[in-house]
Image: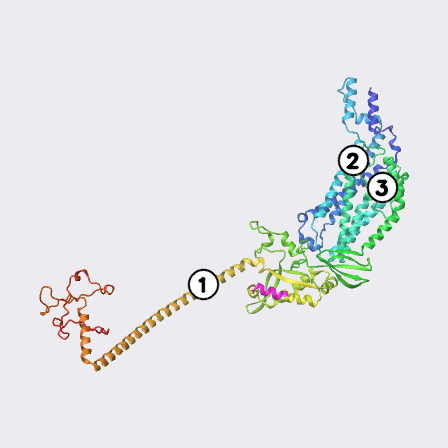
Amino acid sequence: MKSSAKAHRAQRSAGNFGKAPGMLAELPHFNNAGRYVGALLIIGAIFASIGLGLIGMVYAPPVYAPPHLYRSFYLIIPSAFAYVGAALLIAAAGFLSAGIVASIRAHLLASDRQGVAQAENSVFAVPDWARSERLRRRLAIVRALLMPSAASLANWPATLVVLLFGGLAAGGVIVGWLAPPMRIADPLPRQVLSGVLLVAAFPLLVLERSYAAIPAEMLPEARQLNRLLRVPLTTCLGIGISMVLLSLGFTWAIWIYAGLGLLIVVVALELTLRSMAMLFIPFAPIDRLRTVADSSVAGLLRFSIPNFHAFNTAVRQQFGIDLSRSWALAFIQRAMLPVAAGMALMAWGLTGVTALSLTQRAVYERLGVPVAVFGPGLHFHLPWPMGVMREVELGIIHDIPIAISPGDASIDLQQPSAGVGQQQNLVGAEAPAPPSADRLWNASHPSEQSYLIASEASGQQSFQIADADLRIVYRIGPSDAAAIDSAYRAAEPTTFIRAVAGQLLVQYFARYTLLDVLGQSRETFANEFRTALQEQLDRMSSGIEAIAVVVEAIHPPPGAANAYHNVQAAEILATSQVSKEKAKAIQALKSAETNATAVHNSAVAAAVQLVDGANSESVLFDADRKAEQRNSEAFLLERWLERLVVALTGSDIIVVDHRLSGQNAPTLDLRSFDAGSRGVLPPSAENDVAPPSDKNNEPEVEDNEFTTPKSTPRPGPKP
């Protein structure tokens, strides 16, 4: 029993795959495994650290260094570097998994050389306290089952490494895709970064050629590593070339980034699927075991056309299917060339068909000469390169700030369309104010630019600094001439408008002081500035139409905001005090003028009244004098009666006349009644007896002293 347990453990140590002890030394990849273990693990660790570092720098740039350091040394990390990091992680997955498998081979080879006896004494020794032979045998079997064999360590650990790094590579591409692009105005940083990538591609090329030259008998994973190394090599070359093209002004080179990102994602997904497929596929024996880090897509990255025979051989060995006997595949192979030529010809013919949307128009070049401007719709013309369509915007309104910030190129200050921007940034009445509405002076804003303003201090010329936040609303002119000018003379309308507007602002601020700038009407300034800007654009035949100039804010720098507010507050307070004192002075003056006018008017009215009274007395006196001259007796009687009426008014009168006798003698009623009761006798006079109508009994007029004259007395002044 003891000998059978020893044999079992020795066979398990050798791999338990039909190989007798000492047979592993005859395999070349086992004998040479120790030569490649260190190199594979070290290269994989270097690739993993560099890849994770690049992805982390793109994902969180403020964590590892301040932005001014990168602006100083042009060390700007673009988002495309995340693709380089993801490609390096793919290569790291292959090297680390291959290193794990190679280390297991070296360990098995060393165990095989030690022999069964040494393995029995060192690894599977049974403790001495196990007395019975039966207990010894059971402990040996249990320990052999519980302790993992060296061969099993080459299966799942290497597979999990490939799964982990494949997922990290896919995540790195997502980080680079979602990271905001860094706009670098100066082409020098792009050229420096492209040079760094092209230089980094050289050691990758040397490494790829080195593993391509290693035979499969020496290192079975050499061909797999060769294919995986093509991914970072292609990524470095592609991104380096695209950066050079972008620095030269070829904006279409940005699509190279997208193609490389798609390639890396596809390879990472293939590695992940290969790792997950091992859940359903048994591992190969240790002598034929290979790492799962391989990619058929990466194998297509080669200058020669893929060999169909090699692909057929791989499929036949892996799945037992002979593709060379398939009639359909043979037909496809024969018809591939003419079909591809026909599709290429059709695709070239479709370059002569152009569809323009409602916001597009195009300048048509026939053999390099612009002949017409096509509007929206479907147009047929000569195919490329005989006929070229240069697209131009139609009716799109742009809103850009007049700010040039080369040091912070990551901030995108341009809004492509004013109407679209307003529709996308609608704010409700009860919603919080958007960040763009923050116009406080004590905080700087990305779209503000500082300008020098002329001033005078202590009789000497000086200058002051003011921040201006202005936006220009422009569009390409609607005419055909404007479209042609814009297509051939304005490569970067935004940069061109900012340069011209900045020049005009510098000239404007050089002519005025700070108080003039802050006190000037914004509407007047905006109209004058727009007119000057349009003149400059028309002089250069740019085809751009400046619609409006929006003045968001013009104020001192944020550092001087508090001091300027204090100065303004003191000036406002002084102005208010002066205005109050002026108001008091004006009020006192007007009050005195009012009183003087009232006294003067009262005196004039009194004088006029006295003069009129005197005039009326004079007229009455003249009338009395003329009446007395005409009939003095009648005048005197009338006067006497007037005075008598005035004297007797309101007095009780008793008339005694000797000629009145008898019980029912006639009486004269001298009582006065109201004007409204004339002709109506009072109740006490109803029984009065009217005087007789006899002439003998009627008193004479001259004898009756109380007879009222018939004529109405003339009113006059009281005596």
Residue furthest to the bottom: 629
Magenta part mainly helix, strand or loop? Answer: helix
From the viewer's perspective, is 293 left or right of 665?
right
In the rendered view of the protein, which quadrant contains the N terminus? Answer: top right
Quarter of the rendering containing residue 639:
bottom left
Q: Position of residue 613 (x, y in %)?
A: 27, 75
Amino acid on which the number 1 mark rests in the picture: Gln
Q: CA distance from mark 1 to mark 3?
A: 91 Å
The total of numbered circles placed on residues is: 3
Disc 2 or 3, which lies upstream in sequence?
Answer: 3
Secondary structure beneath dot 1 equals helix
Amino acid on which the number 2 mark rests in the picture: Ala
Q: Which residues are magenta?
A: 521-530
Up-down relation of residue 224 to residue 359 (above or below): above
Identified at 53% across, 59% down, the residue is: 565
Q: Which numbered marker is on residue 277?
A: 2
Disc 1 or 2, which lies upstream in sequence?
Answer: 2
Q: Nearer the viewer, residue 713 or 491?
A: 713
Q: CA distance from mark 2 to mark 3?
A: 21 Å
Q: Which numbered marker is on residue 406?
A: none
Secondary structure beneath dot 3 equals helix
Disc 1 or 3, which lies upstream in sequence?
Answer: 3
Q: Position of residue 477 (x, y in %)?
A: 69, 63
Q: Which numbered marker is on residue 223?
A: 3
Is residue 648 visible in the rendered image? The answer is yes
Q: For mark 1, what is the residue?
A: 577
Identified at 22% across, 74% down, the residue is: 711
Up-down relation of residue 553 to residue 716 (above or below): above
In the rendered view of the protein, which quadrant contains the C terminus? Answer: bottom left
How many C-alpha atoms fall within 10 Å of the one at disc 1: few (<14), some, or many (≥20)?
few
